[in-house]
Amino acid sequence: MKAPRFEYVRPTRLEDAIGFLARHGGDAKAIAGGQSLVPMMAFRLAAPRLLVDIGRIPGLNGIAVDDDGIRLGALVRWRDIERSAELQRAHPLLVEAVRHVAHYQIRNRGTVGGSLAHADPAAEMPGIAVTCDAQIVVVGPRGRRIIAAAEFFAAALSTTLAADELIIEVQLPPWRDNRRWAFEEFARRRGDFALAGVALFYDGGADGTATNIHIGAIGVGDTPVRLTAAESAVEAKRITASIIRDAGAAAAASVKPADDIHAPGEYRRALLGVLTERALARAAGLALREDA
Amino acid sequence: MSGRATVQFTVNGKHYAADVEPRTTLVDCLRHDLKLTGTHVGCEHGVCGACTVILDGAAVRACLMFAVQAEGADIVTVEGLADGDRLSPLQASFRKHHALQCGFCTPGILTTAHTLLSEEPDADADRIREVLSGNICRCTGYVQIVEAVLDARAAYKQKWAAAL
Ligand SMILES: Cc1cc2nc3c(=O)[nH]c(=O)nc-3n(C[C@H](O)[C@H](O)[C@H](O)COP(=O)(O)OP(=O)(O)OC[C@H]3O[C@@H](n4cnc5c(N)ncnc54)[C@H](O)[C@@H]3O)c2cc1C
Ligand code: FES
Ligand code: FES
């Protein structure tokens, strides 16, 4: 359980960090909060020869809210989000999802950028990024580019980020005032990775119909996914108990989680259906009969 | 860049410099290099909470940090909670409520609960349970731990009131 040997650098400029990553190719890895990478190194699932500590690069831990949306620096920690009164107003779904990330001590260190780059299929932040059409801003030796969340997650623990690129920021589109939303996940113990989770929001029209519905799920595939079939079951409709049941069934039918040591695939699939129903009911302010 | 690195930080108000391999975790550095063995190490991969220390005011897992990352930090370990031989109010409450049996988890739980009550002296049982979900105790069943933390709140509230 000891990490393999490595060399360690702690640049204070982004260009220098990228320079180290570029020069050392796949042998180098960035470390931010270390809450995923250190366990990976302890298990020797990761063995970088050079660790580039980006934790003290200035300018990467800002939270900004304006008319264009929300911008979170890569080094923003879970605790910063959890405690931000501004984000509670500007993106309550994000804050609620992040409250489900790991435990107190881990939330004090873990970062937004690290979670996106680590790309755990059950992680909350990638799920929010995909559900909310986030844009991920990355910088490398060839300059800066923006990757849509939908294009970012390639497979479990794998992204379209190059080895010498760093995430500097994630951008979430602005949150509307009349928005209804919910986040539901199930984990065996508080703080564990979710067996499955659902994030959703929609804009409530004056006539009670749901428009602009976005539903995303974590823990039910290789990457976070949008549940487009469930979205179609809800879009432009008034949310009722039967619409909720349809959406839950559509959600469950649209995924094919694999069996693993934590749960059989069928279990996660059924769970996703239930969580989708609960989330929709909560967002719509309807009471759901558990035996329905 | 070389095989070893010097790291300097403050632990319990005392300045330390240690010569470590970059791969040395903070918890190993505290225990082996600084001989501060109050901080325990259980799982070494971030799930048990035994290694929790307070780093610049925040409870963190010392097995999920390399010592070199703590350069310049202000660290408090369980040894730093008591005032000499006088138990801190939280520690005294643990004794009063029999909130430990073997004591293996206790350093991590004390440091965690100390930061929680320092920041949220009104934390209720639910919040305390949520925060302590990151600390595994094989002995107590947690009931007395939660009672001890609840009972210690008065001392932290007084500190807050005095600071205002
Ligand atoms: C016991 C335990 C339970 C957990 N439970 C959950 C959970 O329920 N939900 C959840 O979401 N997470 C959970 N986590 C993981 C935690 O949230 C991590 O903090 C997070 O996934 C990674 O963030 P980090 O800053 O610690 O990244 P690090 O560990 O520092 O890095 C992770 C990876 O990202 C890369 N990286 C880091 N920053 C950047 C960047 N800016 N640009 C490019 N690459 C970068 C690193 O090279 C590495 O490959 C848990 C962790 C533990 C130990
Ligand atoms: S030893 Fe650090 S969490 Fe278990
Ligand atoms: S008292 Fe023995 S593990 Fe908690």
Image (tube, coloured by chain):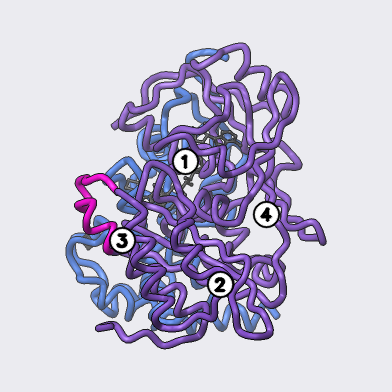
Chain colours: A purple, B blue
Does any portion of residue B86 appear in the rendered image?
no
Q: Secondary structure at mark 3?
A: helix
The amino acid at mark 2 is Trp
Out of A174 and B126, give the one closest to the viewer.
A174
Chain label for disc 4: A
Could you say where residue B157 lies in the image, as x and y percent from the top left? 55, 82
- What residue would you read off at disc 2? A181
Mark 4 vs mark 2, CA separation in Å: 15 Å
Out of A221 and A253, give the one closest to the viewer.
A253
Tell me which label, 2 or 1, sits earlier in the chain.
1
Q: Based on the displayed image, in which of its 4 quarters is residue A78 positioned?
A: bottom right
Tell me which label, 4 or 1, sits earlier in the chain.
1
Q: Is mark 1 within 8 Å of ligand 1?
A: no
Is residue A54 within the magenta segment? no
Chain label for disc 2: A
Mark 4 vs mark 3, CA separation in Å: 41 Å
Q: Residues within 10 Å of mark 1 (few under 14, many from 20)?
A: many
Q: Which residues are magenta?
A: A257-270
- Disc number at residue B137? none
- Disc number at residue A172? 4
Which marked residue is nearer to the observer: mark 3 or mark 1? 1
